[in-house]
Amino acid sequence: METLLAAPEQAPPAAPPVPPAPAATPAPEAPQAAPEDAEGLAGPAQALGPEPAPAAGERHPYVPPIEFDPPLSEEEAVMRADAAVLEANAAAAPIAPAAPTAEPAQAPTPSPSPEGPTGGGGAGRVTGLLNSSAIMAAGTLVSRGTGFLRTMVIAAAIGVASMGDSYNAANTLPTLLYILIGGGALNAVFVPQLVRSMKNDEDGGTAYANRLLTLVVTGLAGVVFVAVLAAPVLVQLISHALMRDQQSAETTVALARYCLPTIFFMGVHVVMGQILNARGRFGAMMWTPVLNNLVVIFTFAMYIGVYGTFQHTGVTPQGISPEGVRLLGIGTMLGLAVQALSMIPYLRSAGFSFRPRFDWRGHGLGKAARLAKWTFLFVLANQAGFLVVTQLATASGKAAEHDGHLGVGLAAYSNALLIWQLPMAVITVSVMSAVLPRLSRAAADQDAGAVRDDLSYGLRTSAVAIVPAAFLFLSLGPVIGSSIYGLGNGGAAAHGTTAVGFMLSAFALGLIPYSVQYVLLRGFYAYEDTRTPFSNTVWVALTQAGTAVLCWLVLPAQWAVTGMALGYGLSYAVGVAVALPKLKARIGGLDTARITKTYVRLAIASLPAAVVGLVIEVFALQALDGWGWLGNVLTLAAAAVVQLAVFLLLARRMRIEELNALTGMVRRRLGR
């Protein structure tokens, strides 16, 4: 997920760092810092007890909580946690104070060049972090590729109907619990402290890392023990519909009990990766999920070898054998175990040796744990809408299956969401990671003009990829779903893969506000304001839950979950409508006219291209009727290439300058 793109037009190499003065100058306070933030997430630097003051011009790292948009795989959760470590390192990069001037600072005017803001005096360190992230980006791409292959094999083995819903619910449960119980706190509270201890402690943070790893191992072992015992209750929280039938309930609970121990391995893997990244060993955390994917692929390939594909078995939770459940469950758990244990050689090569330490008192862990209460509330709000969606999606899927419509429940929704989130995860996160160091400095310097400029750049540059991707999903959603998940799903089972595509089309345009909100929240986080994002998340969750209930009540069962996908994107439009005026009030406005012009022009270029792509899709599917899955793949390739070509032609004719900025960034990254 991490940075595929270079910083937007690097500044000249920084001068050698100047040794800090004997009396360190504290970093300037964020403007309008409300007293209530002292108890919230805004205070990793304040609330973890006495610690060395930052050097002149240096900021303590601050990392927002994981914005968990479920249902995510454990791979996605790990990637987001890894991105948090890079953000912590980038935000901690020392930046030399700007030279004093006699005139008051002016808000920067938008540059005629679209290349974006440049780094400050700490560009050398930030550039090093971004170069390190190239290794992580390569690992991310390979992991994403094997991850999609994994979902294809899973769909081929058990389909996207009721058995897919059962496995998806069981495998999503540990990820949800991990993020809810510990993942958000590790990201927002312990990661900054770990980075800080590596920089400031005499032992290079080894003692703190051992304490943190001991705490995570001990705590998550207890969580796993309780969760396995409480599996029936936990599955009931995810899906009451799967628990109505005794055989379906037994299958789902059995799978959940195999999957729940992955909470332990997820947490251990994340902390080990954070220790490595804080020591400058980037990449291992992004490459090891490939091993997890390979183990799961091998597991489901074995299942296909023994029992056959879903096209031939039509397996259901009621019909799967106990041996089949054990194979799928143990293979899934083994994948996460291999992923976590594979980090040990990397730790040894980095000179880290784990020694359990239980002396947690007086070392900041207690205060950090108390600080995590606001993280818990943030993540809890983020999950509330998801729980409503999973309950209603599985109920709708069951009802639709009873009427003869397969594969329109939770598994289809999850698979469509996995594809839909990819452009934002790769492009928007990459752009904002490159902008993050300057954005942090501008907020610390109370330079609202620079903050406005950086946010405008992030919104406009990411839109170059996000807007055409949204229209691509809108026009080609059905053939995308059939191409990715249709292998081994012929006949009636193919309806489920087409349903994935219709859900992707329903999600499609919501990708635009989804990406916009991600950028806007970085504006609040730059000022260490977490109360506003928390309230914004509540609005998003309420909209998700409300639209899900409305779709369940109004729409036919086979279309209810597709409506929920549309409501998911709508919820982020509501989030943008709530966040935008608050952010403009905070920073004194935003470059709204220029931003709106960019989005409108991109939409104008994308719409005709989408129409062309849709026409090619319809005629190609008719011409290749009878070719099955291969026909879908060929149709997708032809339609997507032509649609993107038409978009690029129109965008260049319209002289959309941000297009040159983004393509230039990609060329610079690929040329290194």
Image (cartoon, grey):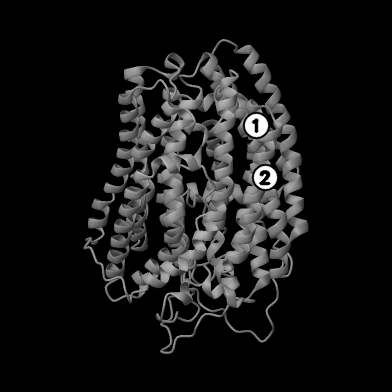
Pick whichever, 129 or 311, lies toward us.
311
Residue at image x 67%, y 45%?
Answer: 546
User: Is disc 2 in contact with disc 1, using a CB cutoff of under 8 Å?
Assistant: no
Image height check: is 557 above or below 443? above
Picture quadrant where residue 637 is located: top right
Q: Which residue is mark 2?
A: 546
Pick whichever, 569 or 369, lies toward us.
369
Q: Is residue 303 left or right of residue 545?
A: left
- Distance from disc 2 to disc 1, alpha carbons, whole Å, reads 13 Å
Q: Give SS at disc 2.
A: helix
Q: Which residue sits furthest bottom?
A: 23
Residue at image x 39%, y 48%?
Answer: 286
- Identify the mark at residue 560; answer none if there is no mark: 1
Image height check: is 47 above or below 608? below
Q: Which of the two discs, 2 and 1, labels the residue nearer the N terminus? A: 2
- Identify the mark at residue 613; answer none if there is no mark: none
Q: Amino acid at mark 2?
A: Gly
Picture quadrant where residue 113 is located: bottom right
In the rendered image, is residue 402 in sight?
Answer: yes
